[in-house]
Amino acid sequence: MSKIESPKTHDSLEFGGSVWLQSGAQTLGGAARIGLLAAIRDSGSITAAAKSVGMSYKAAWDAIDTMNNLAGKPLVTTATGGRGGGGTKLTPTALRLIETYRAVEREHRKFLQRAGEAIEGFAQDWQLIGRLGMKTSARNQLAGKVTKLTRGAVNDEVELGLPGGQTIVAVVTHESTEALGLKEGSDAFALIKASWVMLMEDTNAKLSARNQLRGTVASVTKGAVNAEVTLSLNDATTITAIITNQSADTLGLAQGQKAVAVIKASSVIIGVND
């Protein structure tokens, strides 16, 4: 699905979009990976190509390995020494892939422009459709914007602003930050398994867990051993936790009660629509 920029003014609509190619259920390449291939074609060097597209050398090699595996045949080959000298080259398949992608991308942008001119509110609706079509095993999918990005010695800390004003923080690797193209103001979503969410009473207790999302219990569904508890953070956003029935009884959880969802930053997965 495509990333779409909101109209800057009522009279002037400007849309940005991208497409991706798939191999089975896996993404073979989107704008970032195709851009990397094109940079390798132009420079003949993975080091130079990675630098030109803003990737680390390791992230570039990871992307190349993934593309080679998904394509089922080499897209990038390297050679050292010899009569023709060393260097990195694209195979005919990779060259054709770049041209195919560029052609589809041109037609896709024409489609977005036509749709934007014909449909009021198209930009926001198209972005929402992309999120609704996402499939994942994680029960909780929270959409927001990156409000803060803090670089660390090994990992980065990403703060995501959620609808309603609350924030959620995730710890990700440098490579993930680069691969996802994360920056302040960019759209992203947080994925959190229900079993990673802890619940507590709405108090001012101090915890080591970075994320404490306050809300109101919307429902409590008990099973043989565990209970599924859904917390409304605001009118549009909910988060679900799986806890034991004993814990639910101890906390006295019931519809309408205030509660806090507690999540470690290391348990939050960040994703974007390519």
Image (tube, grey):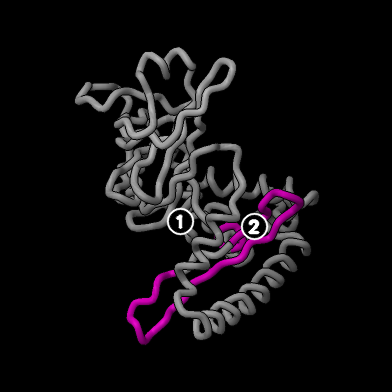
**Is the residue marked by circle 1 packed among few (<14), some (14-19), or many (20+) residues within 10 Å?**
some
Front position among marks 1 and 2: 2
Q: Which mark is residue 54?
A: 1
The magenta region covers 5-34
| For residue 35, above or below residue 217 | below
Q: Quadrant of the N terminus?
A: bottom right
Residue pictured at 73% horizontal, 45% vertical: 69
Where residue 208 sits in the image (x, y, percent)? 29, 22
- Percent coordinates x, y for residue 169 in the rendering: 35, 38
Q: Look at label 1 and name its amino acid.
A: Gly
Secondary structure of the residue carrying numbered label 2: strand
Residue 81 placement, left or right of 199:
right
> 220 left or right of 211?
right
- The answer to which image quadrant residue 89 occupies is bottom right
- Residue tagged by mark 2? 29
**Secondary structure of residue under mark 1:** loop
When asked about the image quadrant of residue 152, the answer is: top left
Counting residues from the N terminus, which is met first, the one under dot 1 or under dot 2? 2
Crowdedness near tag 2: few (<14), some (14–19) or many (≥20) residues, C-alpha within 10 Å = many
